[in-house]
Each structure stands twice: as structure tokens, then as C-alpha cells.
Image (tube, grey):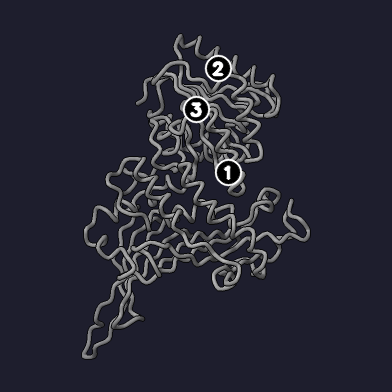
Amino acid sequence: MNTVPTIFVIFGITGDLAQRKLLPALLSLYVKKVLPKKFFIVGFSRRSFTREEFRQLIRDEMNVKSGQYKGEEIKHFLDHIVYEQGYFDDVDSYERLFLTLKKIDEYWKQCSNKLFHLSVAPVFYEKILANLASSGMTIPCGGDEGWTRVLVEKPFGNDLATAQKLDALLGKLFNENQIFRIDHYLAKEAMQNILAFRFANSLFEPLWNNNFIEGVEIKLLESIGMEGRGGFYDDIGAIKDVGQNHLLQMLALVAMEHPKNLNPKMIRAGRADVFKHLMPVKDRNLSKFLTRGQYEGYLSESGVKAESKTETYFRLITYINNSRWKGVPFSLETGKALYKNKSEINIYFKNKINPKSTNVLTFRIQPNEIIQIRFWVKTPGFGVNIEPKTLSFKYSDWGIANPIPDAYERVILDAISGDQTLFASTDEVKYAWKFITPLIKIMSNTPLKIYKKGSKGV
């Protein structure tokens, strides 16, 4: 356990992300006794509350299941939360926040670590960071004890230019080792196991190249629609929402070279190198590689523009221009309002003798995390017929004694410990946007196909 007092400052604490993910993760970590012994959560948002109104809001919105925690555990956790009402663009609000943090340090009689979490829409990042800088809150108060770090949610920028502008601003306030750009998919247990599976099992790594692999499918399918996020989503679309981050990170873990060692610097460099070598998609052959769709009824969603051309589904075929993967197609697919929730990676191995009988290795990220291999065996009898069987490992096999940590629990603990392995680096963001930005500029040249809710897309 980290023994240095730590303050978590959550900008946008009354928002959906904080209520659904951050606070439940912090509560779980508190009950597991892995948070620093001395900690406070300082919420910052524009709404006005009394202390009791705020505590009641947190208690109601966290959606804690009956019996999940003891009543006193929740009460004691709420005792660690204070609220500071303010506006993201108001300098005086930050001065009040500064004084709140100072009073906590004085109460502890010790300089504390401070972790600033931007749980807000990206449009507010620049204002918050600029005001944090002018307030002096980003200045560490004492070496290894008393650091300041910032957690930034995706999407990190809106295109290459905005990402670089935001990165420049962050660079003025923090060193790279203080910046934690969140892609919570990287923190999922099944995602982390991809590298362990590859590099710990000598059976597979010699086959991990274009001589033996025919193609790779990466899918992130959602059965839900907008659920009140239409106004936000309509300005982003599927490619920016999950294509630039989640899907590319899934691709990177499959495709990266074996790092010399598994330290954060080498792993992040390996992921960035994959993005650097993605083949750009040209306008002249765009329709061969990109399919876009929008679900029926999307235009009726709250906050969506009446004539919106925003895609809620896309499938992209891309290639990696290096010796290991040259010629191997990577299919990236995602969509809203589809027939099921499923995130998985399928790796198809070549079978030159019988192309229909391919071996398939599957990493199921969610739900029901699993790693399985499809292989072929002879059917019992006098003929020589073969049929597919599967060899699988389920994470649930570990049982309730080893529950899978929530992704945000890992995000928070790694940020406290300073481990950046599961966070995107400057180079990863830069090369990912270098690949995606030209695609965004030309994708309107492909038709936007309408698909029915609950279907497989287009």
C-alpha cells in the first residue's frame, strides 16, 4: 500500500463516467484496503450542493448492489469525499480548490500526492489545464513524496492537429512521466493477457507472422444505442469514439514486436511502432477497405442533428507495412445497436492443404473473458471426415476467490504507483491520429448505409 497521503481531484464528479466508473472503482479499492491509508477525494463540478445533498447523490448514483458492501464501509468511504463547487472557466473557482487542497495538507501536516482526473468532455480539457497551471496546483510540493499527476480520458484530441495542441499544453505543465492518457481497454485483464500469452508460450510466437497467419479480425460490438449520449456522440462518431483508441490498441497488442524487456517504456514504444507502420488508406480505393453505417432510428435520438451523417458502425481493412505482417489484412469492426455485446480478437492461421479447415485463436475481451483455439479432429467412424473442436481457458475458472479487477481499479492503482504501461504515450497518440485523420477527411466519399437495430451491421 502506498503510505504517502494522496488527494484524488475529480473534475466532473457529478458526470456519468465518475458516477458509473471512477467512484465505484475507488470504493472497491478502499474496501480492499489498497488505497493509501490517508486519502481524500475532492470533487469539482458546477452544480451546487450541501454536504449531505452531495453525499446522498454519490450514494444514489454509484448504484451499489444490495449486499455488495457493508453499510459502514460505504459511510466511511463517503467520509473521505469533499466537494468544491466551481466552473471550469472561472479562475476564482480554482483558487478555492487550491485552498481546499492546502487545508487537507495542513490537516495531515504533510505534503500530499495529487492526482487530477479530467472526467469531462474533451472540449473542457484546455480550459481546465490552463487554469490548473495558473493556480499553481500542478507544481509538486516535494520530490517523490508530493508528486502531481494528471489522468486524461479519451478521445485525446479530435484529430492530429488538436491532439498535438493538447499535448503541447500538457507538456508545459507536466513531464511525460506525470501524464496518464487513459484508454481503459488496455487495463482490462483479458487485454493484458494477450502479451503474456504470446511471449510466455513458445508454441505460438514462431507462428506469429505472415508466413502462418492469414488474417486478423478485431471486433468491438455493442447492442446499446445512444442512451442519452446522442449530442456527444454525434460530434465524434464510431471511428473517433473507439476506432482511434480501443480498436487500434487491440491491434497493437496483437501485432507489436517482442520488446527487449517488459518495462513500460519498451511496451509503449512497441505499440507506437505498430501505429507508425499502418498503411494509409487512399481515396482512390477507399470503398474496398471502408464500410460505414448508421442504425435505423439514430436520427431520432436526443441531441442528434436531423441530417446527421455520423457513422454508428464501421468496418476497416488495414495493413501493417513491416516484414512480420506485410500482406496480412487486419479487419477492425465496431458498431452501436448491434445484435450482441462482444469484444474479441480472432487470429486465422493458414491451412494451405485445406483452406476451409483453418485454426482460429480467439481472445474474448468481454463478456465472459476467454482464450480459445479451434482445431480439427477426425470424426469417429470408417470415413475420414474432420470436424472442429475447441480448447479453451475461461477466466471464470479461477472462481470468485480471484475476481477480475475492474479496468478503472487498475487505472487508478497504476497511476498512483506511476506505472504507465497501460496508458497511451505521446508517440502512440501521434501515430494513431496520423493514421486516422486522413481517413476521417475522405470517409464521406463512401456511402453511409442504414442498418436495422439488432442486426449484424452492414
Q: Residues within 10 Å of mark 3 (few under 14, many from 20)?
A: many
How far from the left and from the top, in percent, is residue 187? 42, 44
Q: Residues within 10 Å of mark 1 (few under 14, many from 20)?
A: some
User: Residue extending furthest bottom?
Assistant: 382
Q: Which residue is mark 1?
A: 163
First in sequence, mark 2 or 3: give its number.
Answer: 2
Q: Which mark is residue 75?
A: none
In percent of the image, x 60 and y 25: which residue is there? 132
Instruction: Identify which amino acid the numbered label 2 is placed on.
Output: Leu
Look at the numbered disc 3 and give the secondary structure of its residue: strand
In percent of the image, x 54 and y 27: which residue is there? 173
User: Looking at the image, is 59 positioned above or below residue 187?
Assistant: above
Quarter of the view holding residue 153: top right
Quarter of the view holding residue 35: top left
Alpha carbons under labels 2 and 3: distance apart? 11 Å
Whether label 2 touches label 3, CB < 8 Å: no
In percent of the image, x 47 and y 25: which residue is there? 72
Q: Which residue is mark 3?
A: 115
Alpha carbons under labels 2 and 1: distance apart? 30 Å
Q: Which residue is mark 2?
A: 101
In the image, taking residue 95 as reference, residue 370 lies left or right, namely left
In percent of the image, x 34 and y 68: which residue is there? 210
